[in-house]
């Protein structure tokens, strides 16, 4: 039976705003533009001791508040209603974390925005980074198109009336290496984890690029 273990962060407080340094974009001070690039550093994420039998850990970050219909997103004179239908957008896919590790430190896997995406899937300490959903979001944008591995932070539509919740999940699993090769997505990871999760925990941060939305 899957158990729960504690997940926390030194970068933000549960249920509170994620600082701009960990976001993909921030509100601009220039009235001629709505947003500008932000720090895009990965936040610090810690977890308690995983249960006996844990062979590796997996970290996913998901925004559960992305508009299902994106046609009005970032459009002048329009707004995305608070109660508009929503879907998921995955911001971070990190696997093969050694169970002896107690955290991922801030800024160690993402610092700034890499046009066309950061390198992957291999990264530090034998870990691997999967493709986040900026890969598909930018597929028709020649200036940004590419493979976006690992972490890229919040960038919700600036005309969205709903603040977005970003949930950082940590899973303890019973296999040492994710049984997938090459590129993989969060959906691939979730399918591969089925029946192998020993424990899980999460922490949630909030973010908005709409100046009229209070957090």
Image (cartoon, rainbow, N blue to C red):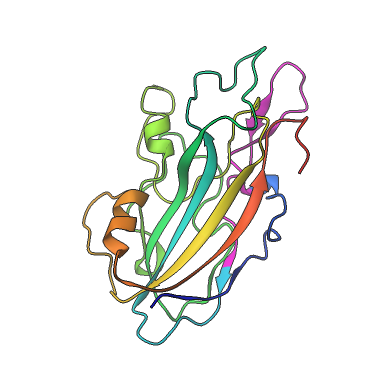
Expressed as whole percent of the image width and height from the top left, the position of residue 110 reads: 51, 51
Expressed as whole percent of the image width and height from the top left, the position of residue 78 reads: 64, 15
Q: From the viewer's perspective, is residue 19 above or below residue 213?
A: below
| 150 sits to left or right of 79 | left
How many marks the image carries: the answer is 0
Expressed as whole percent of the image width and height from the top left, the position of residue 203 reads: 60, 61
Screen quadrant of the N terminus: bottom left
Instruction: State the residue lying farthest toward the top.
Output: 77
**Numbered range of the magenta stretch:** 22-45
Q: From the viewer's perspective, is residue 91 above or below residue 54?
A: above
Q: Nearer the viewer, residue 51 or 179?
A: 51
**Does residue 41 appear in the picture of this structure?**
no
Screen quadrant of the C terminus: top right
Quadrant assignment, res 53: bottom left
| 42 sits to left or right of 121 | right
Name the residue at 69% across, 44% down: 20
Name the residue at 21% across, 56% down: 181
Instruction: State the residue lying farthest toward the bottom.
Output: 52
Q: From the viewer's perspective, is residue 207 above or below residue 193?
A: above
Expressed as whole percent of the image width and height from the top left, the position of residue 137 reads: 42, 31
Q: From the viewer's perspective, is residue 194 above or below residue 62?
A: below
Helix, strand or loop for the magenta stretch, by majority: loop
Q: Which of 150 and 161 is in front in this view?
A: 161
Magenta stretch holds residue 29: yes
Name the residue at 52% across, 45% down: 64
Magenta stretch holds residue 160: no
| 47 sits to left or right of 118 | right
């Amino acid at each position: 039976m899957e158990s729960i273990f504690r997940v926390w962060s030194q970068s933000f407080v549960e249920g509170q705003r994620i600082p701009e340094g960990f976001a993909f974009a921030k509100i601009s001070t220039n009235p001629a533009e709505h947003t500008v690039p932000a720090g895009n550093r990965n936040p610090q994420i810690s977890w308690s001791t995983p249960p006996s039998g844990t062979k590796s850990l997996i970290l996913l970050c998901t925004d559960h508040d992305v508009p299902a219909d994106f046609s009005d997103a970032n459009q002048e004179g329009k707004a995305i209603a608070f109660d508009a239908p929503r879907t998921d957008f995955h911001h971070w896919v990190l696997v093969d974390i050694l169970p002896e590790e107690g955290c991922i430190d801030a800024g160690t896997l993402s610092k700034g925005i890499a046009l066309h995406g950061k390198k992957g899937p291999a990264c530090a300490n034998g870990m691997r980074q999967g493709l986040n959903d900026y890969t598909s979001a930018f597929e028709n944008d020649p200036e940004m198109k590419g493979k976006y591995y690992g972490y890229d932070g919040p960038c919700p539509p600036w005309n969205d009336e709903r603040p977005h919740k970003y949930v950082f999940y940590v899973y303890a699993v019973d296999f040492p290496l994710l049984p997938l090769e090459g590129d993989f997505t969060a959906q691939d990871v979730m399918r591969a984890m089925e029946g192998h999760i020993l424990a899980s925990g999460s922490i949630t941060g909030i973010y908005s690029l709409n100046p009229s939305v209070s957090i």
